[in-house]
Structure formats: C-alpha cells, structure tokens
Image (tube, helix red, strand yellow):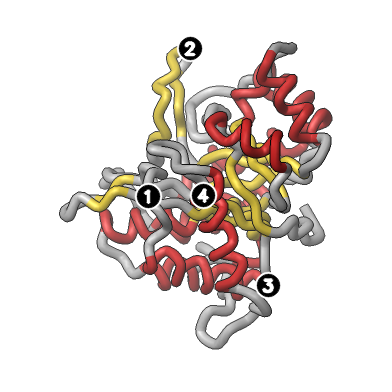
Amino acid sequence: MTGKTPHLGFGLGLRIPHYSHIFEHRPQVDFFEIISENFMAAGGIPLYNLDRILESYRVVMHGVCMSLGAPGELDFGYLKKLKALARKTNAPWFSDHLCWTRSGAHHFHDLLPLPYTDEAVRHVADKARIAQDFMEIPLGIENLSAVAEFSAGTMPEWEFYRAVVEKADCRMMLDANNIYVSSRNHHFDAMEYVRGLDLSRVCQIHLAGHSDNGTYVLDTHDHPVRDEVWDIFKAVYSGCGGAATMVEWDDAIPSFSETHAEVLKAKSLVSGAGAGVAGLKASSASVS
C-alpha cells in the first residue's frame, strides 16, 4: 500500500447527542468519524442522518467487529456491507482494532487482546491484507488498550503492532490514549512505544480521555484528554509529519462545544509541527 494517505485535518466522532447542534449550526469541523456498524443497514434513520452529514462533511469509517485476530476466516458478508458503506461515504480509508471480538458465531462485544507472538503476527497480517485487498482502500489498524496480556508473548506490544502492519502492508490508526493506558497497566515507557513504530504508516490519530483507577487505567472515553496523552500525541503527530486527528467521547458526552474544544486544542498544540523532531524519528530498523 504505497503513498501517503490524505491529511483530512482535525475531526470528531459523530455521536447522536450532537446531531441537533450539527444540523442546526453546521459547525466548522474538518471531518467526522462514524462507527461503521451503526450505518451498515439497508436504510432507516441512521442512513438518513448520515446522508445529511455527507452533504457538508468528509467522513471516515471506524469499525469494532472485523475481529482480525479471531480464529478462522474473515466474515465476507460483513465486508460486503462495509464496502458498500465505504463507497457511499467515499471514505479514504477504513479502520478496526488489533484484537479479536468473536469465536465462531459468538460475538463477545469487547475488544480482546492477542498474544504478541510471530504466529499471531502472521495470522492477523494475512487477514488484514485480504480485507484491505477486498475493500480496495487502505486499512488502518488501531493499537489496543488492555488491562491484561498473554504471558506467552515473545515481544513488546509495539514490535508486534509494527510487525503486523508491515507484513500486511497497511496503515496504523494510532490511538495516543491507548498507548498511555497500556503503558500504565503494563509498566512500559510510552515514548519507547512511539519510537519503536514506523510512524510513516500512520493514517489517523485518535485522542480520548480515560478513567484512572490508581492501580489500573480504563479507556472509557468519558473525560477530557490528559496532559500525558497530549504529550504522546504531539510526538506522534510530529514524527509522522501530520495525520488526520480526531477526538472520541462516548460516555457522559458533554455539549458539542465542549467536545469540539478538545479538537481545537489538538489543532493548536501542533500548529506548524513537522516531521522528524529530534529523538522521535521513527526507527527504520526491521522487526525480527
């Protein structure tokens, strides 16, 4: 997957409590990100509202059900619906998580972690490459936040993540908050994680808040972005030369203006930022 994906600017997750404000005021937002599965029906109110959004805004698609890490084959019925949605929205890429969410016909409705092993790299990368080829647009794989991890892992998370996207020849949908959450839960240096990635593969950056419970942290998307996450974001944004950036807020959702203020803050923090700050250039070393 050659070439750089377009930098769409600074966007926001499209959420129902904000619909009335958006449709009435048409605020200046560079793009909205939709949860793909919420709009994969044949018709109805969700698609009606999506059409209204598409009249004025660019849209990117973010999924939660592809289950790239699950055993077995990809669900091509799901992919056909996803591809139809991509054509409707003219999305420049699609994204999903580095995880598994189902086993057979059973869906767990949770983003479950994988063992960081060479076997898992091959398994996920093969499925990711097939999905990307089928969709005919770039795939961005998102790093996961997790409280638990497998003891069978043979490499740190960032090496696993990098190996998957390189073997699949796809993109990274890099979540700065997830890096921080995992660094706290698993006791690693968040900036070492950033330095261990090939940031030229970043197509999009996620920002969100979390719940800090002292001995562990949960990615709850119900608070403003913390200072430590802003620091990670600035490092990633500079290291990749800029990428589409959006804010997720999924619980205890405040007013549109308060949520949009986080987007404007992201934009102000990296105004004029470029690639290759000292010490944060993406490593070009191959992953073993």
Left/right of residue 133 with respect to residue 245 in the rendered view: right
User: Which amino acid, mark 2?
Assistant: Ala
Q: Position of residue 104 (x, y in %)?
A: 47, 15
Q: Which residue is mark 3?
A: 241
Crowding at mark 4 (Cα within 10 Å: few <14, some 14-19, many 20+): some
Instruction: Determine the CA span between mark 2 and mark 1.
Output: 34 Å
Q: Earlier in the sequence, mark 2 or mark 1?
A: 2
Above or below for 213 versus 238: above
Proximity of marks 4 and 3: CB atoms separated by less than 8 Å: no
Q: Nearer the viewer, residue 31 or 204?
A: 31
Question: Which residue is at 49% across, 43% downward?
Answer: 255
Q: Tag 3 or tag 4, which sits nearer the N-term? A: 3
Residue at the (38%, 40%) spot, across then down = 113
3D distance between C-alphas at marks 2 and 3 = 41 Å
Q: Residue at x 40, y 49 (%)?
A: 116
Q: What residue is disc 4 on?
A: 259
Q: Are marks 4 and 2 in contact (CB under 8 Å)?
A: no
Look at the numbered discs 2 and 1 and tell me whether their residues touch, using CB distance below 8 Å.
Answer: no
Q: CA distance from mark 4 to mark 1?
A: 10 Å
- In the image, farthest residue toward the left: 215
For this view, does 275 lie left or right of residue 119? right
| Sooner in the amino-acid sequence: mark 4 or mark 1 | 1
Observer-side mark, 2 or 3, equals 3
The relative height of residue 42 versus residue 167 in the rendered view (above or below) is: above
Q: Which residue is mark 1?
A: 223
Taking the image as shown, residue 114 lies to the left or right of residue 8, namely: left
* Residue at mark 2: 105
Image location of residue 161, percent across then percent down: 50, 54
